[in-house]
Image (cartoon, rainbow, N blue to C red):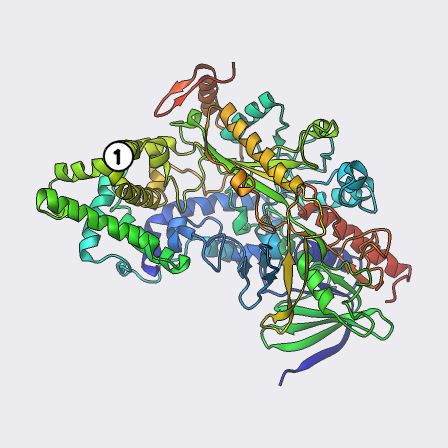
């Protein structure tokens, strides 16, 4: 994992600097804390220590789980699930295939069983079998509309055919790994966006503008991706 | 050949353990002028030097996921320990399934705990008198109240004056304003007539004693790099060392309490984990604060001709009446929160609102099928994305899919999740206790504990009530219940020990035949042996134990100092 740790460290520097500056402002207003922590020098050192450690190595990620052919399919599948859009880059740009490769190795080691690995490997094999039978090509080499035909069979649990349920379960798992790998990456965190993990000098609770929207929805309901019915009245 | 080292130095007090109970005792006694030695089985830990505050999941192995050695993940402040401690096993009797979290580090579990700081109320000290179950404490709320005041003022607890039944207010700092989803939960609770008030956590919202106020990064569990939340080293021990009266020895795994020919404790014997030497520390007074079960273990292993069943165990009750807290959880999804303008919802490391037990009247009117109550803890919102972030959302809320539209929709659904956890009172029972396993030892050659544990119907029906209540709150907000438990799992009731609120094992009382300690947590059989962790507890109200450990430990320590002055205890 050393390689993975190092990957994003450089990009991370600006955000960390802001956090530390904010923290120093807070600390600056509390001179007594320096005495407690053993003086200003120690304090500076401590906060430097808290910043993400500098990269020890800068080599490329070393695969632990997938072979070359699987790797090609995994990368393609990740980007079909999370493509780049106007907000943010794609799953492969966020390092999701590396995350999944590491995660499967990690779970196999920690959990002491190979179930997750078997499900993902088996699902990847099915994609190739299905694509070869229909289009005489491996999944990764099939045309985009051919890939879509296959994925549409397994990407929607409620309308999938009963005989496809094992592959639906595979795809749900793979999608889950891709989504969580993406949104917990540096790119994904910014895409959501998650705005925390920083020092806040004055906490004021829920933004009044946001609360006004919530109150309006309580009164009038809201029809977004999911319906929310009125409920205070 | 193993060496036994005995230093000629005699301390006034030796304290075993450096968590909430050992910390407060160390500080009060050092401040009172006693030459004090604190022994900790783990390594040195100082949150201002070791905190992983502000680091990102994507910069650490496996996005910070839990491992066998770090069950609560990479960022958890617990450096060594967890559900298992390498080389230090424990066993379960057939049919029992006890979980035991031990933190081997200076400050113990105060480094990572939830900082929830609730006073026990007047009813909680007299539960037997109220419903005929369990035991009464040998004193009242009023007797402990001044020590709750002192503890809150020292460690710093925020909260609000509410004047609610059996939910005493304290010496509070101002509470932080609630997050958006918390305000929604409060509106739903108002509708359901469930009290919902600012939480009470040991996190500073104002600077005190040179400790700065919280900077609202929500990561208290990693330990705080600026000492803005309560932790024993940063609040008790390191400041107390400035008196010159307090010495701390780490890697000191206590094996037994030593006894002199006069039947009094003469010190303790520990294994120096670094050298594997057996070391003896002599002291005029011995205070055990090793965490309730570890304290019982040391006592049961302290066998001598005077105390063949373990020190101060003439009642045979050492190890008996171990309790944990009842836990059960439900999670939900609130569509009303979808696609809101982004905001930082971190706040303090924990909930800003909570729901204290609210059904005292219904219970008194015998309208509930179980005794005792629970409080509700909440979480949710735009939390820091780590392992599993938004993982199942597409499957659960979007009927699957993939591609640009799904990606957009997921961004809009971020922050809609809410969690409810009940924390309820367990009544002590005859089937829940620990004893020495006659066949198993740890790597230090110390016999280990075997646990026996059973929930009663009171606890199981409480878990059922939690499940029903939490689901009702979610539905009141127009939400969907995403995780719940039913009869097949006893309503998701936690495993014994899982909530890490173990108390009991050396109960206090007013009769040497039915208790191990007197009302000052002083052993009936050995008058210079005291206990300041949660082992003296005779009940485990739904008020998380740490604040009561602090208050009770403070009272016991003042009593020790006072007794020494009056020469009632030989020093």
Circle 1 Cα neighbour tier, 10 Å, few/some/many (<14 / 14–19 / ≥20) = some
User: Which is more toward the observer, B205 or B59?
Assistant: B59
User: Split into 4 quadrants, where in the image is the N terminus of chain B?
Assistant: bottom right
Q: Position of residue B339 (x, y in %)?
A: 38, 27
Is residue B291 visible from the viewing direction of this image?
A: no
Q: Residue at x 69, y 80 (%)?
A: B5
Where is B303 relative to B242, above or below? below
Q: Position of residue B229 (x, y in %)?
A: 60, 47
Establish if B298 lies above or below B150: below
Instruction: Specify the quadrant of the image occupied by residue A197.
Output: top left
Which percent across, then down, holds residue B501?
Answer: 64, 49
Q: Chain of mark 1?
A: A
Residue B491, image x, y percentages: 55, 39
Res. A101 in view: yes
Foreground residue among A74 and B8: A74
Extreme residue in the left direction: A136
Residue at 36% in and 31% down: B397
B8 lies above or below B568: below
How many numbered marks does the figure carry? Answer: 1
Label 1 element class: loop
Which quadrant is the C terminus of chain B positioned in? Answer: bottom right
Answer left or right for B83 relative to B130: left
Which of these two is toward me, A63 or A166? A166
Q: Relative to A121, does residue B281 appear above or below in the rendering?
A: below
The residue where tag 1 is placed is A160
């Amino acid at each position: 994992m050393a390689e993975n740790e190092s990957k994003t460290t450089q990009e991370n520097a600006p955000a960390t600097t802001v956090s530390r500056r904010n923290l120093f402002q807070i600390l600056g207003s509390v001179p007594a804390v320096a005495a407690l922590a053993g003086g200003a020098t120690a304090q500076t050192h401590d906060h430097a220590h808290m910043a993400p450690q500098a990269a020890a190595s800068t080599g490329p990620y070393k695969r632990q789980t997938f072979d070359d052919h699987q790797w090609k399919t995994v990368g393609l599948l990740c980007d079909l699930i999370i493509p780049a859009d106007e907000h943010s880059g794609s799953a492969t740009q966020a390092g999701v295939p590396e995350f999944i490769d590491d995660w499967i190795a990690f779970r196999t080691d920690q959990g002491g069983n190979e179930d997750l690995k078997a499900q993902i490997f088996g699902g990847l094999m099915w994609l190739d079998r299905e694509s070869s039978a229909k289009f005489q090509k491996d999944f990764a080499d099939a045309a985009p509309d051919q890939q879509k035909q296959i994925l549409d069979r397994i990407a929607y649990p409620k309308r999938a055919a009963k005989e496809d349920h094992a592959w639906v379960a595979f795809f749900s798992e793979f999608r889950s790994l891709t989504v969580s790998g993406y949104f917990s990456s540096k790119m994904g965190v910014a895409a959501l966006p998650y705005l925390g993990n920083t020092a806040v000098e004055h906490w004021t609770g829920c933004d009044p503008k946001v609360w006004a929207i919530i109150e309006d929805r309580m009164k009038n309901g809201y029809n977004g991706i999911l319906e929310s019915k009125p409920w205070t009245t | 050949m193993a060496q036994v080292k005995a230093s000629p130095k005699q301390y006034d007090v030796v304290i075993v353990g450096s968590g909430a109970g050992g910390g407060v005792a160390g500080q009060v006694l050092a401040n009172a002028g006693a030459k004090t030695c604190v022994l900790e089985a783990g390594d040195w830990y100082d949150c201002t030097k070791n905190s992983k505050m502000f680091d990102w999941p994507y910069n650490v192995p496996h996005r910070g996921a839990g491992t066998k050695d770090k069950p609560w993940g990479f960022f958890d402040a617990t450096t060594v320990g967890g559900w298992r401690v390498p080389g230090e096993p424990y066993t379960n009797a057939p049919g029992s399934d006890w979980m035991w979290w031990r933190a081997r580090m200076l400050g113990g579990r105060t480094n990572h705990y939830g900082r929830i700081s609730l006073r026990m109320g007047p009813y909680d000290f007299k539960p037997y008198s109220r419903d005929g179950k369990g035991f009464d404490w040998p004193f009242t709320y009023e007797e402990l109240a001044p020590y709750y005041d002192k503890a809150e003022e020292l460690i710093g607890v925020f909260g609000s004056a509410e004047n609610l039944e059996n939910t005493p207010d304290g010496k509070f700092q101002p509470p932080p304003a609630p997050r958006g989803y918390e305000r929604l939960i409060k509106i739903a609770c108002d509708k359901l007539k469930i009290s919902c008030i600012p939480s009470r956590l040991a996190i500073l919202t104002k600077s005190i004693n040179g400790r700065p106020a919280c900077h609202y990064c929500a990561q208290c569990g990693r330990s705080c790099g600026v000492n803005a939340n309560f932790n024993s080293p940063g609040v008790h021990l390191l400041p107390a060392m400035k008196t010159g009266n307090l010495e701390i020895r780490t890697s000191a795994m206590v094996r037994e309490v030593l006894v002199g020919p006069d039947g009094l404790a003469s010190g303790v014997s520990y294994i120096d984990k670094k050298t594997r030497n057996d070391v003896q520390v002599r002291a005029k007074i011995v205070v055990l604060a090793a965490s309730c079960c570890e304290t019982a273990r040391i006592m049961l292993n302290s066998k001598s001709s005077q105390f063949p069943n373990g020190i101060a165990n003439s009642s045979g009750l050492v190890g008996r009446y171990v309790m944990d807290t009842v836990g059960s959880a439900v999670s939900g999804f609130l569509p009303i929160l979808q696609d809101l303008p982004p905001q930082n919802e971190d706040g303090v490391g924990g909930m800003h609102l909570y729901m204290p037990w609210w059904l005292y009247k219904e219970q008194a009117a015998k309208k509930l099928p179980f005794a005792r109550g629970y409080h509700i803890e909440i979480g949710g919102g735009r939390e820091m994305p780590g392992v599993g972030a938004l993982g199942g959302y597409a499957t659960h809320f979007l009927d699957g899919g993939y591609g640009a539209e799904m990606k957009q929709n997921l961004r809009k659904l971020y922050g809609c999740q809410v969690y409810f956890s009940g924390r309820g009172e367990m009544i002590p029972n005859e089937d829940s206790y620990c004893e020495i396993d006659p066949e198993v030892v740890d790597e230090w050659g110390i016999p280990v504990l075997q646990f026996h544990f059973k929930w009663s119907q009171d606890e199981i029906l409480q878990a059922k009530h939690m499940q029903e209540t939490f689901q009702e709150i979610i539905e009141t907000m127009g939400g969907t219940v995403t995780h719940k438990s039913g009869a097949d799992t006893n309503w998701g009731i936690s495993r014994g020990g899982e909530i890490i609120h173990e108390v009991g094992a050396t109960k206090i009382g007013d009769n040497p035949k039915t208790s191990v300690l007197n009302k000052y947590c002083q052993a009936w059989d050995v008058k210079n042996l005291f206990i300041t962790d949660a082992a003296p507890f005779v009940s485990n109200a739904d008020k998380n134990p740490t604040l009561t450990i602090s208050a009770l430990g403070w009272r016991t320590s003042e009593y020790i100092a006072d007794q020494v002055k009056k020469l009632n205890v030989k020093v």
